[in-house]
Amino acid sequence: MNSCSFPIFDMPTELVDRVIDYVDECPDVLSLALTCRHLKAILIPDHLRYRKLLISLERLDILETVITRPSLGRNIRILRVVPRIGLYRRFPLDRFCCRTKEAEIAAESRLALALSLMPNLTKFMWDMYHEPETKNMIWENIAATCHRFSDLRCYLLPTFRNHCENTLYHSKIFNLRHLVKIDLYIATPVWGNSPVQVDHIGRFLLGCPDLVVLTLAFGHSTPLDTVFHQASWACLESLRLEKVACHPTIFDSFLSLHTTIQNLHLTHSVNESLNQDPFDISLSPGSLPNLHTLTIYCGGPHPRIDEFLRYASWRKLRSLELSRMSCLSDVFAKFLSRHHSIEELCVDTCIAVDSPLSLLKDLLPGDLPNLRDFSGPDLDYIIVCMAGAPLQQLYLNSVEIESDMAEEALRRVAPTLCDIEFVGTPREEVVERLKRSIPELKASWAY
């Protein structure tokens, strides 16, 4: 068939652009461009080059081009704003990448204007040292113009997160609705004895019923009990919380209702939330049947995790990382024996409630048949090696290989072990002795 007879080529260019609007991914745009010369002329370079943009506020050349040629704006799907473009980072770190507050405001105003020309923008990432100086201008233009917008990331560099003016916490970023992915790392006010203002955050989160990914990291503990009590995110797959407060009973109920969760990451959250002693977290039987990755970091005095693991049955679990938690050793051993799927295990700074020796003291041979990476306190690695896990990577303290049992343990895993990474520098004579004693150990030693 002659390409000229294909109906799309008889349409005005504006209508062709509207059809192409539904092709979001760069590989798909390129594939379409390679089908014929007519589409190639339309798609390269204006569509292909502008699908994903990385910009710095100190260099706005590409956005100025969009402002000059507004038709280019509809081609943009992803926009990421960073302090600098390149591999270097200026030291000492400047709060303003444009050097002054006035220049920063002027640059943000041009960014906001460019955003008003991007009706097909789906994702915006603010990866900066500071909150927007214009406070609401960026978020207002996204809400008013970007009707396909569904993916928001706002990350403040931790160095500056505790020195922000908290304008973002009170901004109209929380007026956005119907997002599918939320990734927020923001500063929060110090409330003292005053009630923490969270109603606007609740409306924001509950106004996104189709959430798939939710990451919330605050500077101070922020109570969201009402949100987790009312939320019903039927498609939620990934939940990452840092300094988010919620009563454990409410959070347990939330998890039991959200069976789609695959990745759960809690940092200083849930059990450290009420300015009281840490709560021991629990989990109802049958919860999280699709869990793939579980990470829990605790900053408190080793809260108990027994009731969270006692009835767990996560057949798809691949990665387990616990920090500063405590548990009965037999409960933990039985949990591991039920989860042969685990490939990555980290129990650094975790303790056994009933044993001064090890959280893994009851581990049996064959309990971790798929374990590839391990990191744990003291001499736990010896227990894991002797249990016959096919380890490929070990993370050790430099003194841990000086144990009398180190040689036999490393010999057990020598056929599979690829890398040994140390915190600190082990004594050279110890390393050389082990290499001579275990010639079959070909792993690299990183320290």
Image (spheres, rainbow, N blue to C red):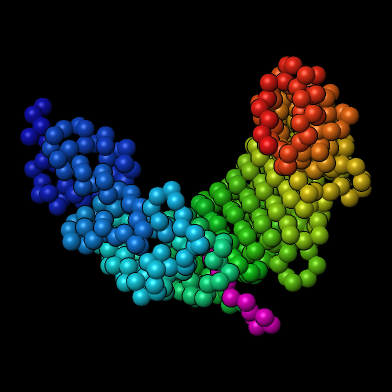
Residue stretch rendered in magenta on the structure: 185-195
Question: Which residue shows up at 67% across the image and 48% down it?
Answer: 295
Q: In the rendered view of the protein, which quadrant contains the N terminus? A: top left
Q: Is residue 14 above or below residue 189?
A: above
Name the side, left or right, on which 429 lies relative to 251.
right
Q: Is residue 140 magenta?
A: no
Query: Which picture quadrant has residue 196?
Result: bottom right
Residue 31 percent location from the top left of the image: 26, 34
In the picture as drawn, the residue positioned furthest to the bottom comes out as 194
Question: Which residue shows up at 84% across the image and 48% down it?
Answer: 351
Q: In front here: 252 or 348?
A: 348
Q: In the rendered view of the protein, which quadrant contains the C terminus? A: top right
Q: In front here: 225 or 187?
A: 187
Question: Which residue shows up at 78% across the image and 64% down it?
Answer: 278
Q: Majority secondary structure of the magenta segment?
A: loop
Q: In front here: 35 or 163?
A: 163
Name the side, left or right, on which 276 lies relative to 59.
right
Name the side, left or right, on which 405 lies relative to 79.
right
In the picture as drawn, the residue positioned furthest to the front comes out as 429
Residue 156 percent location from the top left of the image: 51, 62
Residue 319 percent location from the top left of the image: 66, 40
Query: Which picture quadrant has residue 193?
Result: bottom right
For residue 85, say whether it is visible: yes
What is the total number of numbered labels drawn onto the structure image?
0
Residue 190 percent location from the top left of the image: 62, 77
Q: Is residue 300 above or below residue 311?
A: below
For residue 184, say whether it is visible: no
Question: Which residue shows up at 60% across the image and 47% down it?
Answer: 263
